[in-house]
Image (cartoon, helix red, strand yellow):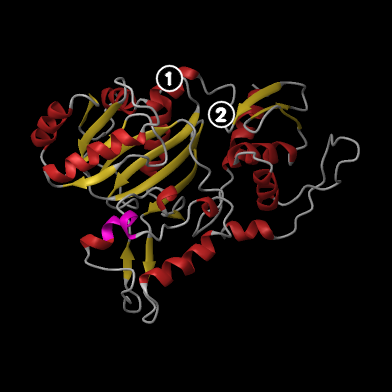
Amino acid sequence: MSFFSFLKKNQRQQENKPKGESKFLKQEAEFVEEQKRKGIGIKSALIEYAAISRGLKVDRLSSRLLIIESKEGNQFGFHNMNGNDSSRIGMNLCDRKHDSRHILKKKGISVVDSEVFGIEHYDEAVEFAQKLGFPVVVKPTSLARGKGITTNIHTLEEFKKAWDKGCEAYRRKKSTNRLLVERHVSGDDYRFFVVGNKVISATHRKRANVTGDGTSTVLELIKQKNLLRAKNPYLSDYLIPEDPEQLDLLEKQKISLEDVPEKGREVTLRSQSNLSAGGDSIDVTETAHPDYHELAVRVIQSIPGIEYGGIDFIANDITKKPTTSNHIVSEVEFSPAPLSHFPFIGKGRDMAGAIIEHYLSKEKN
């Protein structure tokens, strides 16, 4: 079941609805789309929907800020999906990737070897990269959605291009901006979402790709896939680019947009696995090894100041038991994207609902 399941009519009756308001809730996907047209972010819209569907009062203060009142009269403030239990210190620790890795490493959790460098310290960064040994990764320390990231860097020439790309990703050129240089770890990218002591979802973030049908060009296949992505409330904002300069893996595979892949051949388009880079979201919650569920909970509980968040794993096979050599934790996300609400493939998972239930459960304790 994918996000299309939300398109089924399900007339849930509102409680505590203001006078003149519709008697029934709109479907979640339709509600999100309507709120997006008003300039309201998708994460905030989903929290709002989860609250209203449970009969809770909602007072929207801005496009990202709202107050939810429980039936017991308690108030919970939310910025996007982050509420009272998401502290500023937790946000800073997650945003500063090197700090969260330091904490996790001390807890015995596998993280990638890395070092942070100011943007003025290029020579030192090169020296560290050579010490690690290629391939390496360069990424900004505090930007989201894959901005400024270059993976699988094999040469000094590629490193210089990646360094410049990382510097340019910052909106303002400041001497305090920093870049992370880390060992490149081969494997697939997975995002787990944990609330309290429970994994709500696990998603394979698959690199942007198309599958040949034997008659369509790569460009035509991209356009066809983008038609499907455009119908997805989350992926509609992140279509696969059609500019060959942004499809870095095509050149490495010596494939052009005009080539026609044979039927069944999968062509990977970009090295980045982020959905914002055109990647696919595939639900693997029920197929991931149970020990990954336990490890994801442990990661969240290791970071002070947060009670829920996203964990990014790089692993060779998520169905096999994690060991010290077959996976790493690459990042902890303070405010993860709601990609498991509307996966491209698989069952949708109610991230926002789990967060609301987390706060409501505290009233009973």
Question: Disc 1 marks which residue?
Answer: 304
The single residue placed furthest to the bottom in the displayed view is: 215
The answer to which of 143 and 30 lies nearer the viewer is 143
Tally the numbered discs: 2
Viewer-closest of 211 and 312? 211
Q: Observer-nearest residue: 207 or 358?
A: 207
Residue sitting at 40 percent across and 61 percent down?
A: 242
Q: Is residue 268 above or below residue 47?
A: below
Which SS does the magenta portion mostly show? helix
**Marks 1 and 2, how far apart in space?**
15 Å
Left or right placement of residue 162 versus residue 277 in this view? left
In front of the other: label 1 or label 2?
2
> Where 210 sits versus 13, above or below?
below
Q: Measuring 50% from the left and 41% from the top, which residue is drawn there?
A: 337
Residue 41, x across and y down, in percent:
60, 39
Residue 283 lies, in percent from the top left, at 47, 54
Q: Which mark is residue 82?
A: 2
